[in-house]
Amino acid sequence: RYCSLPVECRICKLTLISAPQLARSLHNLLPLPVFEEVDTTEGMVKRTNNKEVKKSADQPTKLNPFELKYNRAKHKILGTKAVSAPCGAPGLSKKKAFENRARTLAVEWKERGKRNKIIDQRIGEGNGMVSNDEYISKRFTAERLKFFKAANSELANDGEEKLTHRGRELTEVGKYDRTILSDEDDDE
């Protein structure tokens, strides 16, 4: 296979270079961890692992000082050392927290309506061992439980609440019962 310079091959995902001289010159410009030398005359491919290439690949990436958070003392305090070392990377922490939430909460959100069991709502049907009276009583208790759960839900509590002030209802407080006269009546 032969690819144009210095594009990565779509099939093998390796950076392919046509001549050794060009590979050596590109090595100084582009730090490639592993590259392939392709000799088009013989049609052979040689893998080269240079120590210099490995050294350039192993170098740690420099951190941007603007991405770090520094704790600076507001006042000088006797007996303490002035430390201006970075204490955290808020951008990285935010990214990790977002990925963690995406792993945990997104899964819960997708499965919010799923149940882990199949509920058979046919109470006593098709069972010859249950008498008619037992069948009716079981259905009655199941319906009562269903309505009980619906009545106790937070959204179902639509009852009108009475407003109070210091334990007394506002309708009982005397100053709220006064009728306000309009200003237009006073002008006449």
Image (tube, rainbow, N blue to C red):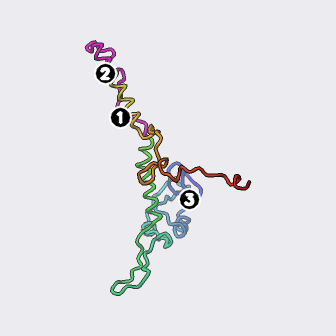
Q: Residues within 10 Å of mark 2 (few under 14, many from 20)?
A: few
Residue 53: in magenta span: no
Q: Residue furthest left?
A: 129
Seen at 30% across and 13% down, the residue is: 132
Query: In terms of depth relative to the viewer, which is nearer, 173 or 76?
Result: 173
Label at residue 138: 2
Q: Is residue 95 left or right of residue 19?
A: left
Q: Who's the residue at 53% across and 57% down the image?
A: 16
Looking at the rendered structure, the kind of residue marked 1 is Asn
Instruction: State the CA–CA distance, disc 2 to disc 1.
Output: 24 Å
Name the main secondary structure of what is drawn in magenta. loop
Distance of label 2 from label 3 (alpha carbons): 82 Å
Q: Name the one closer to the observer, 129 or 144.
A: 144
The tag earlier along the polypeptide, 2 or 1, is: 1
Residue shown at the point (27%, 13%) measured from the top left: 131
Residue matched to label 3: 18
Relative to 22, residue 40 above or below? above
Mark 1 is surrounded, within 10 Å at the Cα level, by few (under 14), some (14 to 19) or many (20 or more) other residues, namely few
Q: Is residue 183 above or below residue 115?
A: below
- Which quadrant of the view contains residue 110? top left
Closer to the eye: label 2 or 1: 2
| Amino acid identity at mark 2 | Lys
Residue 139, position in %: x, y?
34, 21
Say which amino acid is labelled 3: Ser
Residue at the image point whose x is 39% and y is 29% from the top:
147
Q: Which residues are magenta?
A: 111-136
